Image: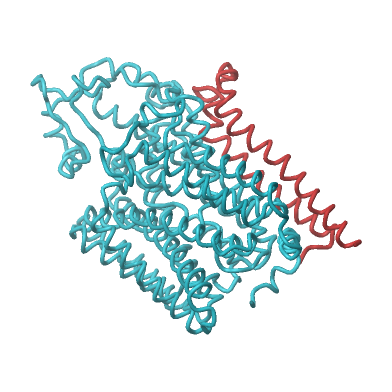
Amino acid sequence: MAENSDNNAYWSANRRIIGISLVIWFISSFGFGILLRPLLSGIKVGGTDIGFWFAQQGSILVFLVLIFVYATKMNRLDKEHGVDE
Amino acid sequence: MDQFTLNLIVVGATFALYIGIAIWARAGSTAEFYAAGRGVNPVVNGMATGADWMSAASFISMAGIISFGGYNTSAYLMGWTGGYVLLAMLIAPYLRKFGKFTVPEFIGDRFYSQTARTVAVICLITASLTYVIGQMTGVGVAFSRFLEVDNLTGLLIGATIVFFYAVIGGMKGITYTQVAQYVVLITAYTIPAVFISLQLTGNPVPPLGLFSDHVGSGEPLLATLDGMLRDLGFNEFTQQTDTTLNIFLFTMSLMIGTAGLPHVIVRFFTVPTVASARSSAGWSLVFIALLYLTAPAVGAMGRVNLIDTFYPNGTSAEALSVETIDSEEKLDWVRNWAQTGLLQYEDKNGDGLITYVADAELNELSVNRDIMVLANPEIANLPSWVIALIAAGGLAAALSTAAGLLMAISSAVSHDLIKSQINPSISEKGELLSARISMAVAIVIATYLGANPPGFAAQTVALAFGLAASSIFPALLMGIFSKRVNNKGAVAGMLAGLGITVVYIFLHKGWFFIPGTNSFTDADPLLLSIKSTSFGAVGALVNFAVAYLVSNATEEPPAEIRELVESVRIPRGAGGAVDH
């Protein structure tokens, strides 16, 4: 049972990291790039507004950082819970 | 050396490279054929995934779509990259731990249901086959345009090359060929973009150039482009004209569709561990982002160059005259591309000028969006070896995606149908042979459909993403993240999501894509402003809701299924899962 409860702790830690990551994923693309674009139109970047930048470039850069941060955090979590290979 | 000989040499050299790799990477076992022996380095797999993912459409058409659609087309950029975040966190690592060969196999095992597996196989084959038709027509077009052979001959040459390395090498041959194809396609895409960015903005990095100042006007490039378009009556590049609801749902559909397309998911079966599946998704996005960050720059700068060409003294001055087009050497490309029909100009009002404006009555120039990539080197006066590179790059993009799709189809047939349902006692050797035969048959069918594309071929991308988003992605997600969803719930959910999405597409595009049988159009859709291409996300929601309701009203999955879910969540032991 000890192993089982540790697996549960590992899984909820994983879900927590995923949850935070997906909030950032959503805000950078659907948020800044689409829904909030009219609100942010006052902030100018390179001849246009920041919403346009997020939609065509910023969100992709955020996605890249997110995946590598997730992979690194999970490698550490795997070791902590002794489930790495 | 003339352009034709140069094209021939560059394309010939890349083809020789692909064949050489195929001979070196022969597959000797089913594990090698289906999953490249699970020994592929995560960075190498990322590069192969990049080539697998970026199709003829990404390479040839996307920059043009952005060029003419501006901000509204951001869904492609966010959707086709954001899907990799979902893959890395929600799908790839767990399916790698599961350790088998196909996506339908996971759905069948997790939901202990042959029906679920068959539904997944049908979705997979439909999505992959519609996708592959586009690649094969792309191969034919690239050959006929750059190598002056007719469409069918070009298609047959392309099919023979794919046949060679896919049938002999399986996933192993495809993986290493895709790495070479990635290098060819990204080089071909980036070089003209760098030159053009330098000419227009003085910045050699196209994604930075996009947000820099325009050398000619001293104003920011995007502000300059918006101003030019305004003068001619077009919508501004940065302006939103589509509804927020439709852009939102289209982006979501492309994202979850990406994370549910089987030919992408299986690429993560080739890496050695769960940890490497996660990092490999990151590397895939690195290699994909190199093109996707460049594409909007190519689109915007291409539009600036196009308008500059037809308004040499600015949009408020006189348009280009027919006489100039006929006499100036640097406008050779206008005449050349007019011959292909991709660019058409006609002095309708007889004033000697070619007027390019938004008003259809007055406009005298029509430009196919593919020109933005295909003619880019000529518009910017780049050397002829760059043009040869574009030919090789387009072919690399089409062939690599076609091979990945054919791989997904053949493994679904040999592993999910023959091995699992028709002849379970088949030996490893027999299964390997049947996988090779399925691959060969799939290539023949795809070649035939590429040569005789059904009228609806262009519409079916919506279908491929709709199927993946509404059926496969939700089933995988629930299979991993819920222990409660059972066989009945999963099957009911998949059928409901799939059914409503397909019906919605048919209502707008015609039943089975037969013209005239549609009741609605995407310009005036059935539900709010939701176009049929954006409906996959709604179908996915229906799938989740039905699956949860049905599962909660029926019995819990058996203990061994809950153990299976426990085991895919834990990385340790993925290596040992190879032999089974």
Examine the rendering and report whether any part of residue B282 can be seen: no
State the residue in front, B493 or B412. B493
User: Which colour is chain A painted?
Assistant: red
Is residue B190 depicted above or below B362 in this figure? Answer: below
- Residue B477 is left or right of residue B129, and the answer is right
State the residue in front, B107 or B21. B107
Examine the rendering and report whether any part of residue B439 can be seen: yes
Residue B479 coordinates in the image, percent (x, y):
65, 55
Residue B557 coordinates in the image, percent (x, y):
71, 58
Q: Farthest residue in the right direction?
A: A2
Q: Residue at x 61, y 45 (%)?
A: A64
Is residue B316 depicted above or below B374 in this figure? Answer: above
- Using the rendered view, name the quadrant where residue B127 is placed: bottom left
- Residue B513 is left or right of residue B562, and the answer is left
- Residue B189 is left or right of residue B312, and the answer is right
Q: Residue at x 79, y 58 (%)?
A: A78
Residue B190 coordinates in the image, percent (x, y):
43, 47
Q: Which quadrant, please, contains the N terminus of chain B?
A: bottom left
State the residue in front, B294 or B568. B568
Instruction: Supply the letter of whichever chain is cyan.
Output: B
Residue B121 coordinates in the image, percent (x, y):
48, 61
State the residue in front, B403 or A15. A15
